[in-house]
């Protein structure tokens, strides 16, 4: 923050001081005691206090607890807080609760043997602006426990300033860029807003262990050596909007938390929905590989794309009851859903057909596939085969059956789990074509492991050679 802006905050608060008034200076080899005095002063104030740091590097061994209701802790330039001790570099522990703080921007520099860069617990309704330049290699750049409705401007990146801080003993690369957790009373970090976060070069960029309703807007999470984002099974309703995910080694987002929304974001590797990730969705954005693990239900892919790199794949989505609407394969420009037309016909029983597979692929064009009954049992058994099926949301048939009396034709779909055909609708005698749409609420049994599906037209009793099946069009709604 510039000097003018810092002192504007000064004027807005009835009580304000410069950190130097407590003996803290960039030339001091250990500002621990001075920082402690400043925190005592913050806690003594009955009106909202403001504490201002002048530019420079402030070295200290132990962080005080900076959490004070309504306090502003700000800077008038680039301020680096360099912790030389083994504890957390910057502590904001609100205990039962601390509200309405404004902190930053501050640069936090822990070393490879220190604790978390920033430890926050029980701080709510506050604005935090940090750039974490390093912390212990098994720790988090920012760890939150029961922090609610905070707003974060946050950077934790090995791509700035020549990399993460190194005091000579090793690079202080965080294990986690941000680690969102609950407190000892199982109260989650919830409904916090992250604005343009930049988290690069850690092991796991963002790990939401216990968190709900948190929203990440824009920014980038990239170049992390494990996952970009991991969301655990105790989490719900977290959202990522307009973000960039790239170059994360094992994948961009691993979702085990329910009702996760990924909206208008771009990914160049893997997004995986694993156990616990039910009822999550991707809306918009460009992605590469998408995976739905076995047993995960309610996933929605809406108006999005995959195969961004040319080698992306869909895994586990076929037959998973995943809802797809407007999923585009960038490499082939194929859009799902659509109407999937058949690729082959097999007359198991019937007379001599008139027409071929192409006759069935265009609706209402005046061309019909005609299959008379045979005099044996069954009178008609026509298999209509489909390939490369991703999902089945319904069946469309336009046609008629000119039988008589008690004669009829069943339209069936193949159940690959039970190896049997399931009747979905019956065609009774008619002299005109009927356009039928049959919805399939659960397609999990109707697509085999290779993306094949089959519709059968079946007359189960003895046929009559004067009875005919006419089909103008048949397709799957995918």
Image (cartoon, helix red, strand yellow):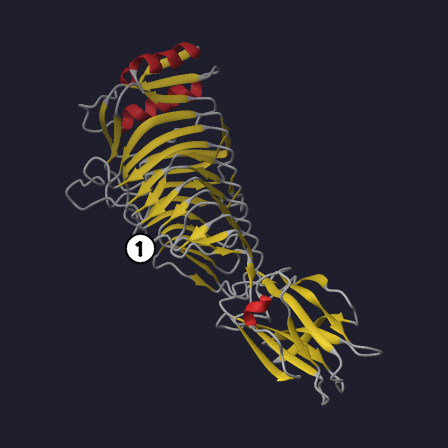
> Residue 225 at what x, y percent from top left?
29, 53
Crowding near pointer 1: few (<14 within 10 Å), some, many (20+)? some
Residue at 35 percent across and 22 percent down: it is 74
Q: Is residue 257 visible?
A: yes
Left or right: residue 206 compared with residue 379: left
Residue furthest to the bottom in view is: 376
Residue at 30 percent across and 17 percent down: it is 2
Residue at 54 percent across and 61 percent down: it is 296
User: For the N terminus, which image quadrant?
Assistant: top left
Q: Which residue is mark 1?
A: 249
Left or right: residue 251 compared with residue 256: left
Left or right: residue 377 compared with residue 121: right
Q: Relative to residue 81, is residue 157 depicted above or below?
A: below
Residue 351 is drawn in which quadrant? bottom right
Q: Secondary structure at mark 1?
A: loop
> Residue 8 at what x, y percent from top left?
38, 11
Residue furthest to the left in view is: 168
Q: Relative to residue 10, is residue 229 depicted above or below?
A: below
Q: Relative to residue 161, is residue 472 depicted above or below?
A: below
């Amino acid at each position: 923050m510039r000097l003018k802006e810092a002192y504007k905050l000064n004027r807005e608060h009835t009580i304000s001081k410069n950190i130097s008034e407590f003996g803290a200076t960039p030339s001091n080899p250990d500002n621990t005691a001075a920082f402690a005095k400043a925190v005592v002063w913050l806690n003594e104030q009955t009106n909202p206090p403001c504490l201002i740091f002048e530019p420079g590097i402030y070295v200290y061994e132990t962080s005080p607890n900076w959490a004070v209701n309504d306090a502003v802790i700000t800077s008038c330039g680039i301020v680096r807080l360099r912790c030389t001790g083994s504890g957390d570099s910057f502590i904001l522990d609100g205990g039962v609760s601390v509200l309405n703080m404004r902190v930053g921007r501050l640069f936090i520099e822990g070393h490879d043997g220190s604790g978390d860069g920033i430890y926050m617990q029980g701080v709510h309704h506050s604005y935090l602006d940090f750039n974490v330049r390093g912390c212990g290699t098994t720790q988090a750049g920012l760890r939150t426990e029961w922090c609610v409705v905070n707003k974060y401007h946050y950077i934790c990146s090995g791509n700035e300033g020549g990399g993460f801080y190194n005091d000579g003993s090793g690079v202080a690369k965080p294990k986690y860029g941000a680690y969102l957790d609950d407190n000892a009373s199982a109260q989650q970090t919830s409904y916090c807003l992250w604005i343009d976060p930049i988290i690069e070069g850690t092991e796991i960029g963002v790990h939401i262990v216990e968190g709900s309703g948190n929203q990440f807007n824009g920014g980038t999470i990239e170049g992390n050596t494990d996952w970009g984002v991991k969301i655990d099974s105790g989490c719900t309703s977290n959202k990522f909007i307009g973000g960039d995910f790239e170059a994360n080694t094992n994948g961009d987002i691993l979702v085990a938390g329910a009702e996760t929304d990924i909206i208008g974001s771009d990914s160049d590797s893997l997004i995986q929905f694993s156990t616990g990730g039910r009822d999550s969705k991707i809306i918009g954005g460009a992605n590469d590989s998408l995976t739905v693990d076995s047993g995960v239900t309610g996933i929605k892919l809406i108006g999005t794309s995959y195969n961004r790199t040319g080698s992306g794949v869909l895994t586990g989505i076929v037959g998973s009851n995943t809802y797809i609407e407007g999923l585009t394969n960038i490499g082939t420009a194929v859009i799902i859903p659509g109407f999937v037309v058949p690729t082959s016909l097999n007359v198991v029983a019937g007379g001599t057909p008139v027409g071929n597979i192409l006759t069935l692929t265009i609706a209402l064009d005046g061309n019909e596939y005609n299959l008379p009954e045979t005099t044996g049992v069954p009178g008609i058994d026509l298999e209509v085969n489909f390939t490369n099926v991703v999902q089945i949301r319904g069946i469309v048939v336009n046609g008629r059956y000119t039988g008589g009396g008690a004669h009829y034709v069943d339209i069936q779909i193949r159940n690959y789990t039970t190896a049997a055909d399931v009747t979905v609708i019956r065609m009774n005698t008619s002299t005109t074509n009927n356009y039928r749409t049959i919805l399939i609420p659960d397609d999990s049994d109707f697509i085999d492991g290779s993306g094949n599906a089959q519709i059968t037209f079946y007359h189960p009793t003895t046929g009559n050679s004067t009875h005919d099946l006419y089909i103008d069009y048949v397709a799957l709604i995918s």
